[in-house]
Amino acid sequence: MWELEPHTKAKHEILRRYLKAWFPILNSWNGRIIYIDGFSGPGRYKGGELGSPLIALDVAINHRKVRKGELVFWFIDEDQDRILHLKKELQALTIPPHFKVQAESGIFHERLACVLDELEAKGSNLAPTFAFIDPFGFSGIPFALVERFLKQNRCEVFINLMADAINRFLEHPRDNIVRHIVEAFGADEAIRIAEESGSNRVESLRTLYQSQLRKVAKFVRYFEMRDRNNRVQYYLFFATNNEKGHLKMKEAMWAVDPNGEFRFSDATDPSQRVLFTELVDTTSLAKKLRKKFRGQGIRSVEVVCKYVEDETAFLAKHARAVLKEEETADRVRVEPLLSDGKKRPTNTYWNKAMITFT
């Protein structure tokens, strides 16, 4: 068991907030949904705080809208002692009869590959699945496996890329270490990053992994975690092909970092649950909207908000705030009537409002 670090607490806050949305949404439309924790750990920290497996179960058990269908929880860890401790924690819970909970020791990438092999041989797909992949290092998570998983319908990942550790091992003399890095990215380009200057390498690793994920997932977001020296430690990547899942993860990330930088640092006061101010700089969003919609004629606010939610890190509420500022600055003209012919109330930016970027 380990002490709960501030950055881990922030990571768990994102996970908890997302699962509060994911479980009820998927459970309402599907007879079976699956949650996978590939590096589950013992389930609890030294101070008694819940680990990721118990957080997932806590959210699902206590959510009033998760009351039907089958919920499968698959917890895997390569350490037998951790799994034994997790099983003891599970025995202390009152688990609903429609939950199927399995905790096992094993190598995550081997176990998941076996499942995918069987499904692909049958031409079948997994039930809607969320996989939390939070390894202790960078070996054992080949990108080829992540790619196969994301090609399954309605599957998404929340994965920890240990960028700082990878950066330190980029020039390692042992071939097997280099091979692990190449496999983790699914590209030889990862090794060529070693030729760059030190200050840029971690960001280059992040950019490469992001571009690899975008080849198989329509929506990709990342959250940056820093250590007590304010140095980048790892990135949490979320990848999905589902619009609503993408939106809910962005909302979870905004809740942990309300200024929209999607960054957490252990160097910040760890006693605060939310460590950032509510001040949001929407200057970049205003520029994006002008570039996207100027000269395009009349558009509905709904179209603008969809673009913002799908293509940027911002939310619809930020889009509406920008539209208000742009109208005040005479850079946006708002039609007096909504798309349904009704009069538009002053200073409102409902979906049916019609606007033109001038």
Image (cartoon, rainbow, N blue to C red):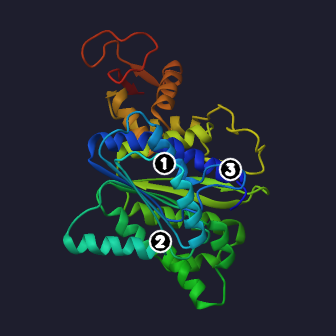
| Above-or-below relation of 192 to 236 | below
- Graded by Cα atoms within 10 Å as few (under 14), some (14 to 19) or many (20 or more), the crowding at tag 3 reads few
Q: Marks 2 and 3: in contact by CB < 8 Å?
A: no
Q: Earlier in the sequence, mark 3 or mark 2?
A: 3
Q: CA distance from mark 1 to mark 2?
A: 20 Å
Where does label 3 land, which residue? 48
**In the figure, residue 125 lies in which quadrant?**
bottom left
- Looking at this view, is 30 or 231 the one in front? 30
Q: CA distance from mark 3 to mark 1?
A: 16 Å
Residue 108: numbered disc: 2
Q: Disc 3 residue type?
A: Gly
In-image side of 285 versus 356 (left or right)? right
Mark 3 or 2, which is nearer the eye?
Answer: 3
Residue extending farthest to the left is 123
- Looking at this view, is 215 or 229 the one in front? 229
Q: Earlier in the sequence, mark 3 or mark 1?
A: 3
* Label 3 secondary element: loop
In the rendered image, residue 152, in percent from the top left (x then y), is placed at 30, 62
Q: Earlier in the sequence, mark 1 or mark 2?
A: 1
In the rendered image, residue 24, in percent from the top left (x then y), is placed at 38, 39
Which residue sits at x=63%, y=90%?
A: 174
In the rendered image, residue 171, in percent from the top left (x then y), is placed at 66, 83
- Confirm whether residue 98 shows in the render: yes
* Label 2 secondary element: helix
- Confirm whether residue 218 shows in the render: no
Q: Disc 2 residue type?
A: Phe
In the rendered image, residue 146, in percent from the top left (x then y), is placed at 42, 67
Where does label 1 land, which residue? 57
Count of marks overlaid on the render: 3
| Above-or-below relation of 234 to 106 | above
